[in-house]
Structures are given as structure tokens and as C-alpha cells.
Image (cartoon, rainbow, N blue to C red):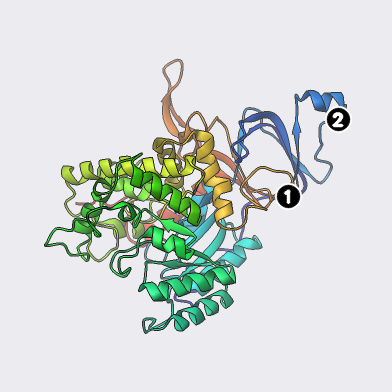
């Protein structure tokens, strides 16, 4: 039941080299994703699509054993990467792959993601594209007939049904059919508790993941702790978490003229909810962390898309829009009550200040949860609120850093923690011999400055007074296939230019 035409599908793959019988990434420093400190120089040996060995160039052990440095052999490839850093492929656990109203085709988000080292995404809902289309794209990505990150389709709960669920058994049957149709998981916005609980239980029985954006309209008062105890796998964004710490109120302080359908009002009010909950470090705060840990909850905060609420002008004027934002996307973002999330009709100082305070407590909670042993993962909700695929993934890393995670912890969240959420931690998420070779190669130390991962680099003043814009991922390796990241970014610019020409535009249209 595809809702999307094949024109929106990715093009057959024409970029990327390999996999090779043997690929040597020579002389790199690795950040392996496990929280181990950086190590180098290392030669990474990849055979086919698997990491075969890590050769520590200066290790006394290697010298003692008189081990010789690995060679690529006649059919292999060796890349001298002296001075480069290598990370595991990054994850976007809240990565909508773009519907036709937001992108010229899904190749556009794929290229943006790969250009930023993102090799795995979870599509929460497959909205507009539908599960069947998204499953096909996931399969084409899995066999590398397209250039795309790995895709885990989470189908929207109830997709294809005209009627709401009335009985728990209907929900269970629907979950079973979603599994048969190839869903890796299910995305919820909440539901009447008796139905929602049955669906989560059935999903767990069948090995499907579950993700929920706790929208207060359908939850009957259930918060993120309630649903985590039912077995929900991941809490998307943050809704439902402060509500689990309320005392003296069961709902947020809605003004009496509140209307959930007025999105600007909804977003402004939701920017005050953490302030209505408990103080960081207080008894209810720590109790909730204990309870969520016990329930095994994962937090997928998507800070990046909400960062627009605390500084809309920054989001609207980001440097990458001029060359890399598709006209469909720009049009969707124009303040418009009909476009979800395009809510900045007349966004005021008061609203931004409320959101900055909201962020302080929200970030403290995510950081505390992680440091107490909880799983937190990176996701971006791209295509919303002036936020783009790929660029947003790097911004999310910067926001995790701001939340209080050490840069190594940030990379851990974006790699191994995310892989474990998706149930692929045995194969992905760290630079470990035996695992699949999904890797990011970057020319500078990303722990010292995460901005070096932005595909358009960053501006800096060189010694001698020269200004330049440089940085960005050099290669993204997925399944042992080596992609030239700047080449992918150039393809994005081409797609944008072509889409603008089709729309009769030559540049980014002014907003006013
Ligand atoms: Zn989303």
C-alpha cells in the first residue's frame, strides 16, 4: 500500500567504491564508540564489509612479536590517512527520510546524511511515504543498490486503517500484520491506554521496537514512565517525562484559552513544562531516573529540532540553506498553520527565553540519565523547523555536548548506544574487529571541535591572516563501500539547483 510514487525513490547507485578484498585505512586515530579513549596511529584492516583487524603502529606488542604492517594486496586498496580521525558510522534514530512535499526525492536526504557520516537511520512513522515504500528503500540500501544509510522503518501505529482501534485484539492483530509487512518497529503518538498497552506488548513479543512521541491528547493521563513500564522501547523528544515528576498537578498549566490545534501556542506552552516539574537533583527527579532505568527506557531527545524554539533566527539563517536547502523544504517551513512544526508565526523574546530555561532542565535530565547508566541516543527529526538532514545530525552532537556529555560520551550515544537501541549492536556501532565496516573519516579531531564534521566546514582565521572555510567528513564508509563525502555534498547542491530551476527559482526565495 505505497502512498509514494517511484519517482520519489532513490536513484540506482553510481557513487562509492568497493567493497574491497582488503581495504587499509593507514595511520589514523580511532575513537571507537565504546568510550575507549582515542588511539593511534592505527591501520584499520577491512575485508569485504567487515573490520578484520586494528594494527597499532607503534605498539610495543606489535614490535615484540615482529608483526609486519598489513598490506592491501594486488586487488585491495590502501588509503594513507595520516592525521585523520575515524569514528564508527553515526546514527540518526529519529530520521524521517523525507516525503515528496519536502524533497526532490529521497536521494536528497540520503546524500545529506552520508555526507555527514550518518550510516544508519530509524524512520519513525514512515509518514506519507508509507511502510511499503520505506521497506523497499531499506532493502535497496541493505544490498547497496542505492547510496543511502541503513534504514529501520518504524511504521506509524494504525497505518492503513480507516477506523480507530476499539479492542486490544484489533491492535494486536494490526501489530502482527505490520511485522509481516516488514516493519522493524512501530511509532506511536499515544493511544487510549488499554489499546496502547496491548500494542506494545504484542510488539515486544514479536521483537519489534516501539517509539512514542507522547502527545497529551490521546494518552488518558499516561506519561512516559507509565508507557516505559508497559515495555515501550524509546521515548521520543521529551514529552511525558516532566509530567512524570509533577506534584500538585496532573496536567501542564494550560491557560484557559489553550487549544492544542494552535501550534504556536502549543509549542510556547510546552516550552514551560520542565519548569513546572521537579528541580534537578531533587527527590522526584532522582526517583524518576531510577524508575526509568528499571523500566529500561531509552531517551531520544532530538534537541536539535527544538533548538529552533530558543533561537529561531539562527535556525532560519543557517549558512547551509543557500546552497543545500531544497525549495520544497523551504516552502514547507514558511510559517503556516497547515504545516506541522512551521509554527513560528510571530515568535517572541518571551517564547525564546522560556525555551532556553526549558532546555536547561531537559538537558540536565538527559545528562543525568546517561551518567546514571541509562541509554540515550541521537536523533534529529529532520525536515522540521528549519532543520536539515545531516547538518542537523552534527548540531545534535553539539547539543549533547552542551547537555554535559564528554565528547567521547557524545560519540558513544551517536554510535554504540544507538546501535543497541536498534538491536544491531553486535554488528554495528563501534570500531571492533568482526563488526561491519561503517566508518567516518574526518581530517581533524572531532573531540576537540565537533564542528569539523559539518559538511560545509567552518570558517576560521589561519596564521598569516587568511580566512578559510574548511573541514567536513572526508569519507563515509558503509558496508565496506567508500563514499567521497564532498562528492555527495556536491550532488546535493546539484539536486537543489535543479529543483529550484524546475520551480522557476535561481536562489533561496526570500521569506517575507
Ligand atoms: Zn518526528
Q: Nearer the viewer, residue 424 or 203?
A: 203
Residue 323's disc number? none
Give the x, y percent position of residue 507. 33, 50
User: Which residue is labeled 2 in the image?
Assistant: 67
Q: Which of 445 and 458 is in front in this view?
A: 445
The residue at the point 48 percent across, 77 percent down is 2
Q: How crowded is mark 2: few (under 14 residues within 10 Å), some or many (20 or more)?
A: few
Relative height, residue 157 to residue 467 (above, below): below
Rendered residue at 52%/33% (across/down): 446
Q: In this view, does 283 lie to the left or right of 266?
A: right
- Say if 63 sits above or below 93 in the image: above
Of mark 2 and mark 1, the one earlier in the sequence is: 1
Between the residue at mark 2 and the residue at mark 1, the CA separation in whole angstroms equals 21 Å
Picture residue at 31% right of the left edge, 70% below the top: 218
- Label 1 C-beta lies within 8 Å of the nearest ligand 1 atom: no
Dot 2 falls on a residue whose secondary structure is loop
Q: Report the front residue among 254 and 182.
A: 254
Q: In which quarter of the image is residue 355?
A: top left
Taking 389 as reference, is 230 above or below it? below
Q: Where does label 1 land, which residue? A: 50
- Please give left or right for residue 77 compared with residue 512 in the image: right
As drawn, is 313 to the left or to the right of 413? Answer: left
**Residues packed near mark 1 inside 10 Å, few (<14), some (14 to 19) or many (20 plus):** many
Dot 1 falls on a residue whose secondary structure is strand
Residue 219, given in percent of the width and then of the height, sits at 33, 68
Residue 338 showing in the rendered view: yes
Q: Is residue 510 visible?
A: no
In percent of width and height, residue 131 lies at 50, 72
The percent coordinates of residue 58 (x first, y second) are 75, 24
Nearest to the observer: residue 421 or residue 275: 275
Amino acid at each position: 500500500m505505497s502512498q509514494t510514487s517511484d519517482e520519489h525513490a532513490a536513484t540506482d547507485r553510481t557513487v562509492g567504491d568497493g567493497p574491497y578484498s582488503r581495504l587499509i585505512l593507514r595511520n589514523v586515530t580511532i575513537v571507537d564508540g565504546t568510550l575507549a579513549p582515542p588511539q593511534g596511529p592505527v591501520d584499520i584492516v577491512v575485508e569485504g564489509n567487515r573490520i578484520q583487524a586494528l594494527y597499532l603502529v607503534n605498539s610495543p606488542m606489535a614490535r615484540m612479536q615482529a608483526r609486519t604492517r598489513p598490506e592491501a594486496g594486488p586487488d585491495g586498496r590502501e588509503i594513507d590517512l595520516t592525521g585523520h580521525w575515524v569514528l564508527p558510522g553515526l546514527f540518526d534514530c529519529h530520521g524521517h527520510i523525507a516525503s515528496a512535499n519536502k524533497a526532490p526525492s529521497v536521494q536528497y536526504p540520503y546524500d545529506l546524511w552520508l555526507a555527514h557520516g550518518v550510516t544508519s537511520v530509524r524512520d519513525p512513522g514512515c509518514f506519507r511515504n508509507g511502510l511499503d515504500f520505506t521497506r523497499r528503500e531499506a532493502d535497496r540500501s541493505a544490498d547497496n543498490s542505492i547510496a543511502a544509510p541503513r534504514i529501520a522503518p518504524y511504521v506509524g501505529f494504525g497505518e492503513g486503517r480507516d477506523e480507530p482501534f476499539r479492542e486490544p485484539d484489533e491492535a494486536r492483530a494490526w501489530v502482527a500484520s505490520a511485522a509481516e509487512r516488514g516493519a522493524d518497529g512501530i511509532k506511536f503518538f499515544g493511544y487510549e491506554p488499554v489499546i496502547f498497552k496491548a500494542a506494545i506488548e504484542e510488539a515486544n513479543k514479536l521483537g519489534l521496537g516501539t517509539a512514542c512521541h507522547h502527545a497529551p491528547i490521546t494518552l488518558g493521563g499516561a506519561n512516559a514512565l507509565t508507557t516505559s513500564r508497559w515495555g515501550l522501547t524509546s521515548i521520543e523528544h521529551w514529552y511525558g517525562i516532566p509530567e512524570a515528576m509533577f506534584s500538585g498537578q496532573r496536567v501542564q498549566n494550560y491557560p484557559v484559552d489553550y487549544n492544542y490545534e494552535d501550534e504556536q501556542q502549543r509549542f510556547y506552552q510546552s516550552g514551560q513544562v520542565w519548569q513546572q516539574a521537579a528541580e534537578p537533583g531533587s527527590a522526584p527527579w532522582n526517583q524518576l531516573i531510577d524508575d526509568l532505568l528499571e523500566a529500561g527506557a531509552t531517551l531520544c531527545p532530538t534537541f536539535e529540532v527544538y533548538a529552533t524554539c530558543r533561537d529561531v533566527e539562527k535556525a532560519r539563517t543557517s549558512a547551509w540553506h543557500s546552497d543545500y536547502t531544497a525549495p520544497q523544504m523551504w516552502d514547507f517551513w514558511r510559517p503556516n498553520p497547515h504545516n506541522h512544526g512551521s509554527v513560528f508565526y510571530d515568535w517572541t523574546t518571551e517564547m525564546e527565553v522560556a525555551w532556553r530555561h526549558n532546555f536547561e532542565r531537559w538537558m540536565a535530565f538527559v545528562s543525568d540519565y546517561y551518567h546514571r547508566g541509562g541509554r540515550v541516543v541521537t536523533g534529529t527529526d529532520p525536515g522540521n523547523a528549519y532543520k536539515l538532514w545531516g547538518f542537523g545530525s552534527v548540531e545534535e552532537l553539539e547539543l549533547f555536548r552542551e547537555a554535559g556529555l564528554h565528547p567521547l560520551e557524545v560519540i558513544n550515544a551517536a554510535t554504540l548506544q544507538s546501535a543497541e537501541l536498534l538491536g544491531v549492536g553486535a554488528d554495528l556501532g563501534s570500531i571492533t574487529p568482526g563488526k561491519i565496516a561503517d566508518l567516518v573519516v574526518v581530517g581533524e579531531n572531532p573531540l576537540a571541535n565537533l564542528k569539523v564534521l559539518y559538511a560545509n566546514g567552518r570558517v576560521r582565521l589561519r596564521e598569516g591572516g587568511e580566512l578559510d572555510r574548511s573541514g567536513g567528513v572526508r569519507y563515509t564508509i558503509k558496508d565496506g563501500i567508500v563514499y567521497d563525502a564532498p562528492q555527495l555534498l556536491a550532488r546535493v547542491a546539484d539536486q537543489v539547483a535543479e529543483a529550484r530551476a524546475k520551480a522557476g527559482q535561481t536562489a533561496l526565495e526570500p521569506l517575507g
